[in-house]
Image: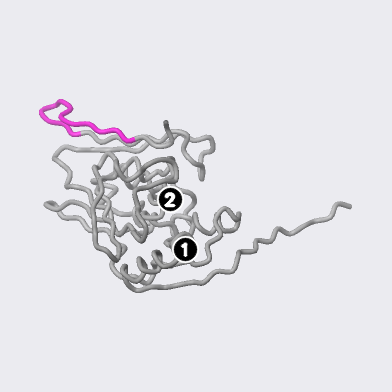
């Protein structure tokens, strides 16, 4: 009779921090440079730790830092989304569904409902995956990435944020705090389409977001953002 084995995941021992300010979290990243990882939703980090792809000695949670989540929209200033906002919140947001449709559709394509209830927008983007479903939407909405550290703040256009698979412009001690999109022009619409092998819970082998503005019955402006392509 074949023997049955139970798979056991053993994580390497690590020290856990729960800072309450960006400055404190940034200082910890700098202090433990190369040995620490940030924890947002944990849906990527914990899997990597279980697989021993990452073995941090220090894990720094962003959960206790106020002001890092939530969706704000103003007709003059546009859209602002905190980096710790849950993917499920993006998917269900009436503002995104009606005005920034491709964003809500992209969020709804990520993993399962359980995953989306844990995963965050910041984590999805900072992981640097070319297949990130929210990245294509951020591109067509001309998003700006807000970055902060103990040294101050800066803003980077989303198209300049990614340097390659798994690589971003983030420097030592820097943390993404929010994403900002300009207000939409009249008669604008968008959509996100994902090509995948399985019907649900699969990475895109091609993901495409498009945003179009019409004026006098003609296309006045159009933007396309692609994911998982070279």
Q: Residue at x 22, y 52 (%)?
A: 79
Q: Is residue 225 above or below residue 19?
A: above
Question: In the rendered structure, which segment of residues is drawn in magenta?
Answer: 213-225
Q: Residue at x 31, y 42 (%)?
A: 137
Instruction: Specify whether residue 139 is painted magenta.
Output: no
Residue beneath disc 1: 36
Depth check, front residue: 95 or 10? 10
Q: Is residue 23 above or below residue 41?
A: below
> Under tag 2, what secondary structure?
loop
Image position, residue 225 (x, y; %): 32, 35
**Mark sitting on residue 127:** 2
Image position, residue 170 (x, y; %): 35, 52
In the drawing, does residue 216 fall left or right of residue 223?
left
Q: How dense is the environment of label 2, judged by Cα within 10 Å: few (below 14), some, or many (20 and up)?
A: some
In the drawing, does residue 98 fall left or right of residue 28?
left
Instruction: Specify whether residue 220 is painted magenta.
Output: yes
Q: Residue at x 16, y 55 (%)?
A: 74
Quick one: quadrant of the C terminus? top left
In the drawing, does residue 24 fall left or right of residue 61?
left
Image position, residue 227 (x, y; %): 39, 37
């Amino acid at each position: 009779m074949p023997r049955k084995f139970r798979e056991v995941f053993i994580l390497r021992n690590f020290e856990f921090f729960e800072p309450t300010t960006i400055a404190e979290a940034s200082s910890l990243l700098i202090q433990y440079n190369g040995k620490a990882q940030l924890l947002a939703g944990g849906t990527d980090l914990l899997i990597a730790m279980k697989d021993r792809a990452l073995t941090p000695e220090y894990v720094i949670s962003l959960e206790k830092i106020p002001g890092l989540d939530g969706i704000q929209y103003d007709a003059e200033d546009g859209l602002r989304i905190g980096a710790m906002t849950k993917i499920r919140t993006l998917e269900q947001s009436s503002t995104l569904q009606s005005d920034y449709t491709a964003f809500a559709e992209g969020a709804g394509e990520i993993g399962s409902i359980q995953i989306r209830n844990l995963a965050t927008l910041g984590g999805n983007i900072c992981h640097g995956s070319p297949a990130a479903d929210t990245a294509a939407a951020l591109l067509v909405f001309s998003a700006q990435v807000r970055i902060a550290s103990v040294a101050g703040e800066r803003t980077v256009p989303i198209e300049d944020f990614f340097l390659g698979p798994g690589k971003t412009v983030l420097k030592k001690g820097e943390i993404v705090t929010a994403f900002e999109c300009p207000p939409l022009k009249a008669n604008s619409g968008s959509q996100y389409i994902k090509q995948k092998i399985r019907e649900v819970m699969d990475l895109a082998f091609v993901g495409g977001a498009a945003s179009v503005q019409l004026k006098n019955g003609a296309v006045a402006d159009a933007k396309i953002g692609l994911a998982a392509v070279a």
